[in-house]
Image: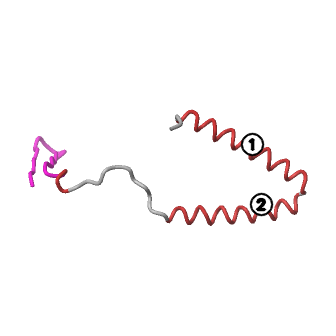
Amino acid sequence: MLSPRIRIWAARALAITITIGLSIYLWRVGLDRADKLGSSISAVLALGALLSSLLPARNNDPILTVADTTNVQINHGGGNIQNNYRS
């Protein structure tokens, strides 16, 4: 697994590469055609982002079971009262 520092630098390099590539494309194709293509790509990416937000999140944490909740401690902030409940 890559360290967070390597991932950050890789993301920066990718962003710079994409920016340079889009600038060259814009210069070669022209503003009108690049604007139409950019709008189409943006619409597809926005739709993909919307659909990905609807997917359930993957959670690697273990599921809390009833056996894990046998000892519950409730501390009341108003005084020195402490209740320990066992189920």
Q: Position of residue 70 (x, y in %)?
A: 13, 51
Residue 60 lies left or right of residue 86; in this view the side is right
Residue at the (31%, 50%) spot, across then down: 62
Residue at the (89%, 51%) spot, across then down: 27
Q: In this figure, what is the number of numbered marks?
A: 2
Kindly identify the amino acid type of the residue bearing the numbered disc 2.
Gly
Please say if 43 is above or below 28.
below
Residue 33 lies left or right of residue 8; in this view the side is right
Residue 6's quadrant in the figure? Answer: top right
Residue at the (17%, 53%) spot, across then down: 67
The answer to if 60 sits in the magenta stretch is: no
Q: Quadrant of the C terminus?
A: bottom left
Mark 1: secondary structure: helix
Kindly identify the amino acid type of the residue bearing the numbered disc 1.
Thr
> Which numbered marker is on residue 17?
1
> Which numbered marker is on residue 67?
none
Which residue is the site of mark 2? 38
Q: Which residues are magenta?
A: 69-87
Residue 22 lies left or right of residue 84; in this view the side is right
Q: CA distance from mark 2 to mark 1?
A: 17 Å
Please say if 60 is above or below 45.
above
| Neighbourhood count class around disc 1 (C-alpha, 10 Å): few under 14, some 14–19, many 20 upward | few
The answer to if 75 sits in the magenta stretch is: yes
Choose the circle earlier in sequence order: 2 or 1: 1
Q: Position of residue 82 (x, y in %)?
A: 11, 44
